[in-house]
């Protein structure tokens, strides 16, 4: 589509580009360029048009598109990036990924600007406004044992921390198993879903929500949630953070594949683990108790010390 070609040019130029140069480069008329720019403006792109200078893309933090995500992913230069599916609106990117997973053989990433029915862990909902956050689901089809699938959540958690570190130069922490927190507030969550049959895993969908440029939150989560913008003052191009997360995920996923567990990622994960050495409340519905978190084992279970006994916590929730 012409508008995507024009967008690519505007994205890669930090100063004005003349309509004449764009039309020459793309081999189309200046009127066609003008029309493409008008469509991009309608799509929400803030494009400045200056006589005798041309077009310049301004504050692109509020926009997101397949072209922007692909361009940022390509900058990492790795082979076989996932196919990108971009949507302006969807019920849930995890649900969408499930629906299309049969028709796509290779890995793919569904990204949406907003969700109408964003899902959180443990049956909760996930606040999903437009224009400020990341909602994405990475669908992979690895040939690993079914019981290993839940470890992907921990692999994604480490990757998210590394991406945030790379882009914002801050050190976020992981609240076991997979909440990403900064200054004790939740900035990102992961919901991993899987499907299997007699032959093994059909797909693993790792759904990630990141509060990026959000300026406020609904009353019910105001006390516990925050965004990277509120914590750092930095407004970020969401496509950059998406690309960095995907890049770090594949690096860590390849490490995971060597042993099909957390053996070689344990150190990295524990470096980010907020709970380590701290007293945690184990919120087991049958038996609530406190214990000291020691770290994780190769399967990703949280190891805790309760009255001198070491216990493995494999699911549910702990509170700091
Ligand atoms: C949590 O409860 O911490 C997990 C939140 C996961 C939210 C993400 S947003 C993208 C993907 N689609 C969903 O419906 N949920 C996940």
Image: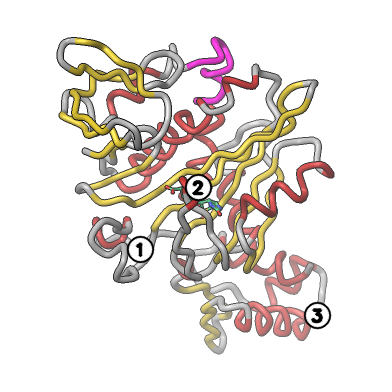
Give the labeled residue for mark 3.
Answer: 29
Place residue 133 in its image quadrant: bottom left
Q: Quadrant of the C terminus?
A: top left
Q: CA distance from mark 1 to mark 3?
A: 36 Å
Give the labeled residue for mark 2.
Answer: 208
Q: Is residue 133 above or below residue 37?
A: above
Residue at 65% over, 17% down: 145
Residue at 74% over, 31% down: 202
Magenta segment, prevailing SS (helix, strand or loop): helix
Q: CA distance from mark 3 to mark 2?
A: 42 Å
Query: Residue 317's x, y, as percent?
Result: 35, 37
- Highlighted range, magenta: 252-261
The residue at label 1 has a CB less than 8 Å from ligand 1: no
Give the label on residue 235, or none.
Answer: 1
> Is residue 174 among the parts visible in the rendering?
no
Give SS at disc 1. loop
Query: Residue 237's x, y, as percent?
Result: 45, 59
- From the image, state whether disc 3 or disc 2 is nearer to you: 2
Query: Residue 226's x, y, as percent?
Result: 29, 58
């Amino acid at each position: 589509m012409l508008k995507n070609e024009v967008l690519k040019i505007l994205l890669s130029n930090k100063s004005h580009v003349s309509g004449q140069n764009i039309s020459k480069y793309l081999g189309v008329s200046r009127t066609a360029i003008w029309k493409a720019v008008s469509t991009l403006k309608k799509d929400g792109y803030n494009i400045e048009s200056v006589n005798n200078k041309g077009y310049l893309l301004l504050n692109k933090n509020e926009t997101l598109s397949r072209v922007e995500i692909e361009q940022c992913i390509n900058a990492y230069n790795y082979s076989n990036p996932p196919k990108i599916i971009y949507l302006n609106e969807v019920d849930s990117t995890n649900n969408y990924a499930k629906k299309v997973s049969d028709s796509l053989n290779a890995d793919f990433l569904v990204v949406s600007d907003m969700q109408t029915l964003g899902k959180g862990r443990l049956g909760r909902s996930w606040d999903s406004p437009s224009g400020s956050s990341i909602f994405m689901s990475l669908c992979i089809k690895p040939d690993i044992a079914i019981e290993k699938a839940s470890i992907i959540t921990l692999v994604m958690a480490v990757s998210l921390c590394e991406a945030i570190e790379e882009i914002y130069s801050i050190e976020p922490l992981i609240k076991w198993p997979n909440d990403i927190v900064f200054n004790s507030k939740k900035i990102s969550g992961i919901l991993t879903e899987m499907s299997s049959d007699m032959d093994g895993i059909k797909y693993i969908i790792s759904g990630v929500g990141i509060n990026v440029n959000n300026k406020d939150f609904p009353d019910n989560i105001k006390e516990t949630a925050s965004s990277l913008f509120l914590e750092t003052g930095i407004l970020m191009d969401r496509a950059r953070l998406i690309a960095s997360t995907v890049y770090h995920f594949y690096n860590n996923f390849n490490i995971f594949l060597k042993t099909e567990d957390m053996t070689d990622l344990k150190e990295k994960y524990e470096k980010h683990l907020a709970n380590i050495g701290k007293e945690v409340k184990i919120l087991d519905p049958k038996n609530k108790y406190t214990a000291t978190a020691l770290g994780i084992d190769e399967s990703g279970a949280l190891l805790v010390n309760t009255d001198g006994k070491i216990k493995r916590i494999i699911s549910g929730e702990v509170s700091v």
